[in-house]
Amino acid sequence: MSASAGSEFSDGSAPKPGPGRTGRDWADPAFSGLAKACGIVVLVLIGGIIVVMLSGGRLAFTTFGPGFLTSSAWNPVRDVYGALTPIFGTIVTSVIGLVVAVPLAFGCAFYLTEMAPRWLAGPVGTAVELLAAVPSIIFGMWGFFVIVPIMARDIQPALIHSVGRVWFLHPFFSGAPFGTGLLTGGLILAVMVTPFIAAVMRDVFNSMPPVLKESAYGLGSTRWDVMRQVVLPWSRTAVIGGIMLGLGRALGETMAITFVIGNTNRISASLFSPGNTIASLIALEFPESAAGSLKLSALLALGFVLMVISFITLACSRLLLRAGKA
């Protein structure tokens, strides 16, 4: 066949696909375009949410200015609103939740992958995954009817009469033991985010090449040495990603924290004092906010602030990863 014959043989038939062709040259460009479109859709969705929150909260930002972020006032009667109290509650409860959840999740994941017998690791791992699927409102009801009475009757009085007697810890463990408060909210968040972090860590530890751990054990390392010098350095990136996943869940949790935090607009150093979070305040106040009102604008502004906090935590995690790789 000559070069001028085009894409047909002399008898008029079309050439058959070569060894590296399938006859579907459109498939790869179509798949590439579809993947690119999915990425663009995600960016558009995030940008749309930001625009809606920012435009909806513009009235509050223009009315109160930077004082909206530094004021603890929340008075719907006088139409005076500030974001400091819910920001404080959101950060404190999330930090408490992570402080409790990360060691629990790591211990659970390491036990299931390195120490537990095979007949036990499977069912316990499934139970951890099922715990992650429990609706948040169930955690809230359980916390209100079970954890709050235990905190009021046993844990908070014990902390007041033990840790609270230390002079520099007294401001954090003082007050009436009502059971609700920032500490209780943080503990409920810890129970909720532990399964997410543990599931990520377990999958990462299972994907680690066995030869690395076997070599360390062959050199006489203990389980603690293997965990500290082999497992953690190898899985650092994924572990930080799992922790950030849990932090994102804790920052945006609504119903569970609403049941147990006390829902009071005030800031106190005591972990026993009631408070609120951005998500819980929006959930409680949104149904009572009239369209176009300053109160509704303040709630939308709080939603924008929550997104900014989430982006800041994500940026911090990226910086930690870069510092670890340097």
Image (cartoon, grey):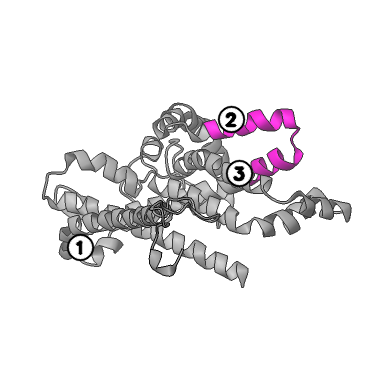
Residue 105's label in the rendered image is 3
> Left of 223 or right of it: where is 104?
left
Q: Amino acid at mark 3?
A: Ala
Question: Which residue matches tag 1?
Answer: 61
Q: Amino acid at mark 2?
A: Ala
Residue 48 spot, x, y in % from top left: 25, 55
Residue 127's label in the rendered image is 2
**Can residue 132 be seen in this snapshot?**
yes
Q: Nearer the viewer, residue 245 or 142?
A: 245
Residue 65 spot, x, y in % from top left: 21, 66
Q: Nearer the viewer, residue 128 or 155?
A: 128
Q: Nearer the viewer, residue 164 or 100?
A: 100
Work out whether mark 1 precedes mark 3 in sequence or the reverse, and give the earlier one: 1
At 35% from the left and 60% from the top, the residue drawn is 308
**Can residue 270 be seen in this snapshot?**
no
Q: Quadrant of residue 114?
A: top right
Q: Which residues are magenta?
A: 104-130
At 33% from the left and 46% from the top, the residue drawn is 279
Give the main secondary structure, helix, strand or loop, of the magenta stretch. Answer: helix
**Mark 1 residue element:** helix
Work out whether mark 1 precedes mark 2 in sequence or the reverse, and give the earlier one: 1
At 23% from the left and 50% from the top, the residue drawn is 299
Q: CA distance from mark 3 to mark 2?
A: 13 Å
